[in-house]
Image (tube, grey):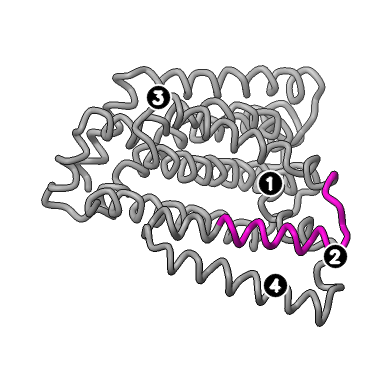
Amino acid sequence: MLAIYKRELRSCFQSMTGPVFVAFLIAFTGIYFMAYNMMSGYPYFSYTLSGSLIVFIVGIPLITMRSFSEEHRNKTDQLLLTAPVSLPKVVLGKYLAMATVIAIPNVIFCIFPLIIRSQGTAYLTVDYISIGVFFLLGCVYAAIGMFLSALTESQIIAFISTFGIFLVMYLWDGILSMLPGSAVSGLVGVLILITAAAFYVWHMTENAVLSGGVEIVGAAVSIAVYVLRSEIYENLLSNLLGRLALANVFTGITSNNIVDVTGIALYLSVIAVFVFLTVQSIQKRRWS
């Protein structure tokens, strides 16, 4: 795993995607830092970081788009699949390399609260926690982007799909506010989610019976619950999908100085899920 980690990290900086990401994130954050903290005298660096979230939407897809799609296109993934190291270690080696690239600017950000303190009042605990959560959010995005890269051999498709999903997640609160709150719409939304789950099962297993069973059983249970207690479906979509606004865990610190421990657990869970899905996606390719 260490060899794969070093290879991937070296590749990130040889292709200039790593240096460009690090430089742009630091420069973008530095502009906000000068505007908010230095010139306006705002004491929280965490507020400055919130303005840099938009960099993740473009920057992280640049890092992740080539992680597995390029290997697939160049057929070098066969070397990885036959290497004397387990597939989870291969995926983790690549993922940790991307996490290291994301960590570099965050280590540099640790200097900024000290600059604020040298000029006056600073809230170091909140600022350093926000830097840590900011880094975790970047790792969540990297796990999602890596999974999407494993689904295609085109770097362009990997970039566009990752960028599109990140953009939707960035606008998620506004999208949820437009969803209807009636019980019928909640039922329709649940049926759509069940159909998506059944399609994913079919994509991974190519077993029509299994995916059809997931669809039929899920739909039957959902309709039965609606008939018995339809009030459960009222505002269900907003409540259920609201947790997908992953950036809210970070903005909760910047806006209210509140650390959501369950949100950090959510971040770690999402990372684990998408690393696992990446392994399963590549494993399917091995046996297909």
Q: Residue at x 47, y 24 (%)?
A: 22
What kind of element bears circle 1?
Answer: helix
Residue 197 x %, y %: 54, 59
Label 3: which secondary element: helix
Query: Please, is residue 58 above or below residue 171 in the view?
Result: above
Specify whether 231 is left or right of 282. Answer: right
Question: Which residue is rendered at x = 50% and y = 66% of the image?
Answer: 212
Sequence-wise first label, 1 or 2: 1
On the picture, is 188 further left or further right than 20?
right
Question: Which residue carries the number 2 mark?
Answer: 183
In the picture, the disc for residue 222 is 4
Q: Is residue 215 above or below residue 17?
A: below
- Of badges 3 and 4, the one in the foreground is 4
Q: CA distance from mark 3 to mark 1?
A: 28 Å
Q: Badge 1 is on which residue?
A: 126
Disc 4 residue type (three-letter) = Ser
Q: Nearer the viewer, residue 68 or 154?
A: 154
Prevalent SS, magenta region: helix
- Residue under the image location 80 percent in, 40 percent down: 174
Name the element at disc 4: helix
Q: Please identify, in this view, whether the residue under mark 4 or under mark 1 is nearer the observer.
A: 4
118 or 252, which is in the foreground? 252
**Disc number for residue 146:** none
Q: Earlier in the sequence, mark 3 or mark 4?
A: 3
Mark with earlier residue (4, 2): 2
